[in-house]
Amino acid sequence: MKYRKKPVVINAWQFTKENYKQGVPTFLRSKEVEFWSQFGGDVIGGEIKTLEGVMTITENDYIIKGVQGEFYPCKPDIFEATYESVESCGGERE
């Protein structure tokens, strides 16, 4: 059998130095997600407590809040192959 992924709208944020300097979005402020920076912000990283265990966040990863409120990191190439902006689908931006 073949299955198609149901279309769902998720919240996601790309973890870049510039975005981190501007501030972490409210939806990511959780005890499950921890960010850090070192060397005056030259190195950034973090960890997410996921359903599968603790996962490392590296620069340029997307952090996704899933449909059940869970968090997980996603590499940019996978994210871009899997998701598209709601704006590009004709929907509203949150």
Image (spheres, rainbow, N blue to C red):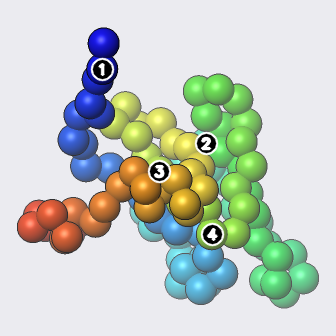
What residue is disc 4 on?
A: 60
Q: In this view, does 40 lie above or below 77?
A: below
Mark 4 vs mark 1, foreground winner is 1
For badge 1, the amino acid type reads Lys
Q: Is mark 1 on a helix, strand or loop?
A: loop
First along the sequence among labels 1 and 3: 1
State the quadrant of the C terminus: bottom left
Q: Distance between the residues labelled 1 and 3?
A: 25 Å
| Cβ–Cβ under 8 Å for marks 2 and 1 | no
Q: How far apart are marks 3 and 2 (CA)?
A: 12 Å
Q: In this view, does 17 lie above or below 1?
A: below
For badge 2, the amino acid type reads Glu
- Judge left or right: residue 15 versus residue 56: left
For badge 3, the amino acid type reads Ile
Mark 4 vs mark 2, foreground winner is 4
Q: What element carries label 2?
A: loop
Q: Is residue 26 above or below residue 4?
A: below
First along the sequence among labels 3 and 2: 2
| Cβ–Cβ under 8 Å for marks 3 and 4 | no
State the mark number for residue 64.
3
- Judge left or right: residue 45 versus residue 67: right
What residue is disc 1 on?
A: 2
